[in-house]
Image (spheres, grey):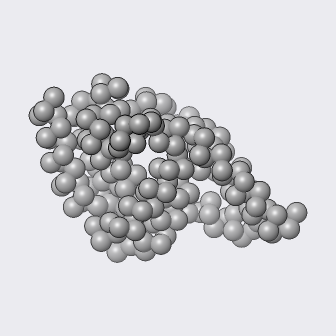
Amino acid sequence: MNKLEQQLVFLREIDRLKAVTRQSPLLDGSRRENSAEHSWHLAMYALVLSEYACGSINAHRVMQMLLLHDIVEIDVGDFPIHGGTSSEIQTKQEVRAAERIFGLLPQPQADALLGLWQEFERAETEDAKFAKALDRFQPLLTNVFTDGGTWKESGVSLEQVLARYGPVIARGAPQLWVVCERWVARHFQEK
């Protein structure tokens, strides 16, 4: 198979991400979002909100990470933050999926995209910290603006929200966390 054929196989394969339904609803409440929509929306968050990153970032790289970060869900499905899944099992499954899916691409492109996915997962660089922050920020925003959305469904408390979202968002985008704290406090006061 030549380079173009390999790239087209990969692009056909990732079309399957559109069929992975996430727990989060759309803001209008009409249905749950799929993982492809989530990834696209996060890339837009990076484009629009990059000035709020904690450190100096490359917004293009952040967008790339966000477009790639959930591709593994083609094989393993979505693991909701409030789902109680073992992180060790999830990590093993996702690593296998990443190797398989990115392995469809020709070299060195396969290694480059797998490397971006791994960088996102490790969340050690400024780009990855910001990408991770946005990956927590978007569902938090969705829950607040859908009157509790998945938090209500899963019986999530204020303390759980602060513990699960706070450190990641504050680490990569502290100004966004300040906004989140206000939203979350207001949301739980009204309940």
Quadrant assignment, res 133: bottom left
Q: In this view, which residue lies farthest toward the right?
A: 1
Quadrant assignment, res 185: top left
Image spot of residue 122 (x, y percent)? 48, 55
Residue 15 in view (yes/no): yes
Q: Quadrant of the C terminus?
A: top left
Q: Residue at x 54, y 50 (%)?
A: 36
Horizontal arrangement in the rendering, residue 89 relative to residue 49 (left or right):
right
Horizontal arrangement in the rendering, residue 132 relative to residue 94 (left or right):
left
Residue 92 in view (yes/no): no
Image spot of residue 181 (x, y percent)? 18, 48
Horizontal arrangement in the rendering, residue 40 relative to residue 162 (left or right):
right
Q: Residue at x 40, y 68 (%)?
A: 47
Q: Is residue 153 above or below residue 17?
A: above
Q: Residue at x 45, y 61 (%)?
A: 43
Image spot of residue 188 (x, y percent)? 16, 34
Image spot of residue 146 (x, y percent)? 29, 38
Q: Is residue 108 above or below residue 73?
A: below
- Count all numbered tags in the image, as a single digit: 0
Q: Quadrant of the N terminus?
A: bottom right
Quadrant assignment, res 171: bottom left
In this view of the protein, which residue sits in the foreground, 85 or 42? 42
Horizontal arrangement in the rendering, residue 12 relative to residue 55 (left or right):
right
Q: Is residue 6 above or below residue 148?
A: below
